[in-house]
Image: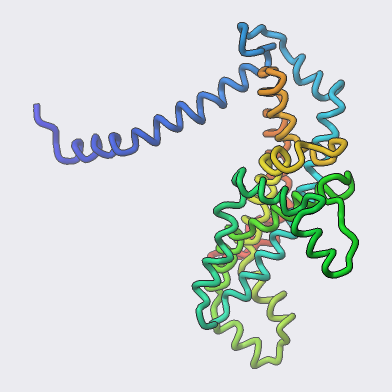
Amino acid sequence: MRLSAAKKRSRMGYIYILPWLLGLLIFQLYPLIASFAYSFTEYRVTGSPKFIGLSNYLTILKNDDLFWQSLAVTFKYVLMAVPLKIIFALFVAIILSQKLRGINWYRTAYYIPSIFGGSVAVSILWRFLFMEDGLVNRILAQLNIPSVPWLSSPHVALLTLVFLSVWQFGSSMVLFLAALKQVPEDLYEAARIDGASRRHIFWHITLPMISPILSFNVLMQMINGFQDFTGSFVITGGGPLHSTYMIALKLYNDAFAHFKMGYASALSWILFLIIFLITAVFFKFTSAAVYYEDGGNRK
């Protein structure tokens, strides 16, 4: 029996998406379901999972002081890194949106750090830059400024990781740049004719018009911030005195250093719930402030 042309096209379509579908099922959906099941067990890899109900969750919330400390460090990191990265990305995007000679080269150069920023190699480089006799302190010495214990002081170490995060502003910058290009020039011309200053134009035209991208960037950077791991693991190892011990690093240590897979699975679902609640609150309080060209604010 011959297949119709439409059925042949449908079959070919399923064949084309099969690699992606297998990847979704094997590397995303299955681990998601498995981690949820393991979160209710005592599982140490070498043995069989033993069902213990909500014991992992109760232990994390009631008896694990390191969990609360790592959560506080993570919140502190996100509250510092996200606003700085967003502000810096928007500032650079505004500059790169100007009609300047060789602007495409500058746009590429500013985006490059985001390609390599999350890699282990860059984190190692960052550690050498900010070590006690690293390049940063050498530059400070040339300026007659006392050296800073970037990696050895509990009060400064987290700031070093924040700098690394801000340095990876390229992806947010590209989105801001695309949004700025979509702002109608007529609005700027009308504002200039009415005598509006640059500050008023930015606050009353530019910012409202790019508010959907601004909201998206803030949300995505918050989510990424709560899951940030490489810098804490490679640069500081969570120290000194757990001042950079973020929750993703704790999850990793519980799973792969202490082999408490069930416990780490419960911790990952608590992290998921935290991110979910923050996302819901974010949408609740920002939806009225985001302008959509097709229908105003979404409430």
Name the image quarter holding the N terminus.
top left
In the rendered view, tell whether residue 16 sits above or below residue 254.
below
- Quarter of image, res 196: bottom right
Please state the horizontal and vertical placement of residue 265, each as a whole percent of the image: 66, 23
- The mark tally for this picture is 0
Name the image quarter holding the C terminus.
bottom right
In front of the other: 130 or 55: 130
* Residue at 62 percent of width and 9 percent of height: 46
Residue 140 visible in the snapshot: yes
Please state the horizontal and vertical placement of residue 200, each as a whole percent of the image: 73, 81
In the rendered view, tell whether residue 34 sits above or below residue 5.
above
Residue 182 visible in the snapshot: no
In front of the other: 47 or 199: 47
- Quarter of image, res 291: bottom right
- Quarter of image, res 170: bottom right
Residue lying farthest to the left in this orientation: 1
* Residue at 68 percent of width and 91 percent of height: 194
Please state the horizontal and vertical placement of residue 254, each as a whole percent of the image: 72, 23
Q: What sort of colour scheme is used for the picture?
A: rainbow
* Residue at 70 percent of width and 92 percent of height: 195
In the picture provided, is 152 more to the left or to the right than 295? right
In the picture provided, is 19 more to the left or to the right than 39? left
* Residue at 61 percent of width and 88 percent of height: 190
